[in-house]
Amino acid sequence: MTALVLLDHDSAAIKQPARSAVAAALQLGAADVLVAGHGVQAAAEAAAKLPGVGKVIVADGEAYANGLAEPLAALLVALAPAYTHLLAASTAYGKNVLPRVAALLDVQPISDIAAVVDANTFVRPIYAGNGLATVQSSDEKKVITVRAASFDPVAEEGGSGTIEAAPAVAAQTLSRFISSELSRSERPELTAARVVISGGRGMQNGDNFRLLDPIADKLGAAVGASRAAVDAGFVPNDYQVGQTGKIVAPDLYVAVGISGAIQHLAGMKDSKFIVAINKDEEAPIFQVADYGIVGDLFVVLPALAAELERG
Amino acid sequence: MKILVPVKRVVDYNVKVRVKSDGTGVETNGVKMSMNPFDEIAVEEAVRLKEKGIATEIVAVSLGIPACAETIRTALAMGADRGILVETDVELQPLAVAKLLAAIAAKEQPGLMILGKQAIDDDMSATGQMLAAFLGWPQGTFASQLTFADGGITVKREVDGGMETVALSLPAVITTDLRLNEPRYASLPNIMKARKKPIETLKPADLGVDPTPRLKVLKVVEPAKRKAGVKVADVAELVMKLRTEAKVI
Ligand SMILES: Cc1cc2nc3c(=O)[nH]c(=O)nc-3n(C[C@H](O)[C@H](O)[C@H](O)COP(=O)(O)OP(=O)(O)OC[C@H]3O[C@@H](n4cnc5c(N)ncnc54)[C@H](O)[C@@H]3O)c2cc1C
Ligand SMILES: Nc1ncnc2c1ncn2[C@@H]1O[C@H](COP(=O)(O)O)[C@@H](O)[C@H]1O
């Protein structure tokens, strides 16, 4: 039994959610990985160092430069015969490609697994995490996306995989990449950070998000947001934590001016410790918070920054 | 251009969902049902494209039990022109839904299909991508803006690190993200008018599709509940507890 894992990377390093997907694959048996992109030799070498990885298949070419689903799916289908399981992290990248692969293989995908029971059986959250379903697949091949927050990632070093080139796949003309606008940040990525501090509608505007900066700096935290804060344009869309945004499970999650709607809780309630700062003592966020401060965030945040500064 | 919009009947997003004590699923009896919120965004987008003269006809499709006709009526009240109900008691999973939708597309020949990026009940986020694969069409998932030019479509997508823009040939499959638009409420006159719009009913067998699920649900349990913790008096106490009790900073 060997699994193939499609890796999220930035051409140089392998992203943490992908390392979690490798961890899930290793629970099933042996794991090979696929690195696709243009100019990805460094990423391929990084992939070969992931502990437990057998083969690193590298698809290096312009067709893969921007992660378009159509050519990637065709490539995965070409590689599929050698594998019992095909996996990817359930990031925007993985979720875009794997279901397309599943259809081409006539397989029902198993999205966003939170645990492996056996080779055919998996646990996945449903209804915004209000239920945990154990599902058993009757398909011969399994196509799976992995909830990264539920699997400890494999380390970055220690492995000795072998690198080989992917077979050529016919070009496609269905889709074309135009441009991307990625939010630049010096901070850790939301899905990889040990501490996350998120702001909600209570922040009132984008400028006020700067009140989170000194605290994030001090704690090495990533900054996230509720849907309401994103919809209002306070911060970019990729800050959204929740059922339909990013799923995080850091050691510490600080929710500031966030009420705690089911859809938000779905994205952060597996955090080890939760702190809530909210002026409404009835806010549902306090029902899941380990530590709560009832107060005005415009008073509490500067005080918290100062307290952390005092060391 | 004809647009097909699949709309799913789901437990309303405001309902606090409860797992059944026998572990067979979640309680849906007597629970408020609504159109999947992402599908409302899809219908809204189609209606706006019709208002701009880009779309000529909007067909709302729902698959499932007879009550899914209500979801189609909601789409008709928002501005869709007619409906197709694929009626079955079988629990439908994305693979079957995508096959049924592909069969409908073969009959209807739409220029565009707009789906939600995710159904908020099964949280699969798979059907649109699978439908695109069955049809051999390009896919524009997690869309937050659509622009039509030169016989194709440009899609702004929400991706892991921000936004991305791709150009697709038509016909194509789009899945909606939250920022694509804000759906309208149907007006009373439009709700009345929707009653007269036609809904065609089909069975999976009419479309030559076997809808048998491939995933068997062995059990559904409630996740471990978090307990409410303590309220602290001030930031000094908070920082002290985070350092010495939780040991996370
Ligand atoms: C299909 C669908 C998908 C969704 N997906 C997501 C998702 O992925 N993520 C997500 O977050 N939401 C999601 N939502 C939205 C969700 O239902 C809530 O609307 C949203 O989470 C509310 O955001 P909020 O808590 O910031 O805003 P609000 O609910 O408006 O809460 C603001 C909070 O700030 C507090 N506050 C205000 N001023 C201050 C102050 N000065 N000091 C301290 N506290 C203050 C208030 O007491 C209040 O509790 C989704 C909804 C739908 C329908
Ligand atoms: N039974 C259904 N009837 C109509 N549309 C559906 C159905 N199931 C899924 N869809 C469509 O597929 C989208 C994604 O669903 P899913 O892949 O289940 O998360 C939904 O937002 C709908 O647009």
Image: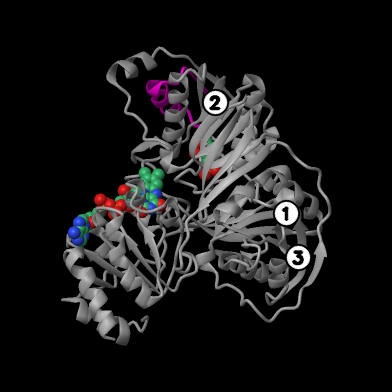
Q: CA distance from mark 1 to mark 3?
A: 11 Å
Residue B13 against residue B105 in the figure, above or below:
below
The circle drawn on residue B4 is: 2
Q: Is residue B77 magenta?
A: yes
Q: Amino acid at mark 1?
A: Lys
Q: Amino acid at mark 3?
A: Thr
- Answer few, some or many: residues within 10 Å of disc 3's Cα (few below 14, many 20 plus, some between 14 and 19): some
Numbered disc 2: secondary structure: strand
Residue A233 against residue A132 in the figure, above or below:
above
User: Which residue is the site of mark 1?
Assistant: A141
Q: Residue at x 28, y 19 (%)?
A: B188
Quarter that holds the C terminus of chain A: bottom left
Q: Are marks 2 and 3 on the same chain?
A: no
Region rendered in magenta: B64-88
- Closest to the observer: A253 or A197? A197
Q: Position of residue A200 (x, y in %)?
A: 30, 56
Return the disc, 1 or 3, that comes first in the chain's sequence.
3
* Res A79 quadrant in image: bottom right
Q: CA distance from mark 2 to mark 1?
A: 31 Å
Q: Position of residue A174 (x, y in %)?
A: 69, 36
The circle drawn on residue B17 is: none
Left or right for B51, reference A166: left
